[in-house]
Image: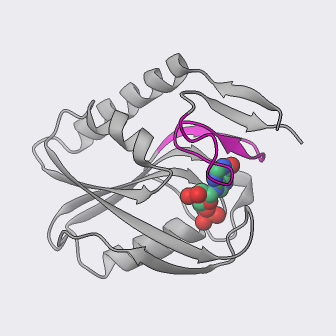
Amino acid sequence: MEKEILFSKEAIAGRVRELAAEISRDCAGRELVVIGILKGAFVFMADLIRQLQVPCVVDFTQLASYGSGTVSSGSIVIKKDIGIGIEGKDVLVVEDIVDTGLTLDFLVRTLRERRPRSLKVCVFLDKRMRRKVPFTADYTGFAIDDGFVVGYGLDCNEQDRSLPEVYVIKE
Ligand code: IMP
């Protein structure tokens, strides 16, 4: 599959530093529970937490969406739950990309029921034009146009997660 570079290692590192600085400012004096959504978020989350100036504990959740191929269908279930209680805690959910918004809308509603003190969402990429439900992240790395992207944790059929840059797949 042919692909074209969208964000270089340097562009990604610069933006991750800015996001971490913004989150650290907003959350000064608090300890964060950082929750990554498997699998795609693990690379971004690893870079982000190492730049945070506030203490954090980390956990992961994995969701499954019943649909085919590259589109989520809307029916989402928790495949792996977090192991940490979040009641009264300051939570930061970290995700690789928000597309239709269905995944994060579901997860945020689910986690809010557990009554965290605060809950914010940080996404690396945002395909704003493709929303099926309204969803706005508190922190966004880059807004991108429609098109399928891989690298920096993002995959296409499990391929290309390990690429250090972000690429858009050409039709
Ligand atoms: P949403 O529920 O439609 O917002 O979907 C979010 C999920 O879809 C992400 O966690 C990704 O797993 C996947 N996804 C959406 N767009 C892309 C893409 O361009 N590349 C890789 N995965 C994507």
Dominant SS type (magenta): loop
**Would you say 102 lies left or right of 121 here?**
right
Q: Residue placed at 36% from the left, 33% from the top?
A: 47
Which of the 4 image quarters holds residue 85?
bottom left
Question: Whole-percent x and y of residue 111?
Answer: 33, 74
Which residue is at the front of the view, 20 or 2? 2
Note whether residue 93 is visible. yes
User: Which quadrant would the C terminus be assigned to in this image?
Assistant: top right
Residue 167 forms part of the magenta stretch? no
Which of the 4 image quarters holds residue 26?
top left
- Seen as rendered, the residue at the extreme right is 171
Question: Whole-percent x and y of residue 70?
Answer: 73, 61
Which residue is at the front of the view, 114 or 2? 2
**Would you say 78 lies left or right of 144 here?**
left
Which residue is at the front of the view, 31 or 95? 95
Q: Residue placed at 17% from the left, 47% from the top?
A: 56
User: Which quadrant would the N terminus be assigned to in this image?
Assistant: top right
Residue 147 forms part of the magenta stretch? yes
Q: Residue placed at 46% from the left, 27% from the top?
A: 15
| Ligand 1 positioned in quadrant | bottom right
Question: Whole-percent x and y of residue 66?
Answer: 64, 79
**Would you say 23 lies left or right of 165 here?**
left
Count every numbered label the image shows and give the total. 0
Question: Whole-percent x and y of residue 114?
Answer: 25, 79
Which of the 4 image quarters holds residue 24?
top left
Q: Residue placed at 70% from the left, 76% from the top?
A: 67
Q: From which residue to which does the magenta span run?
A: 140-162
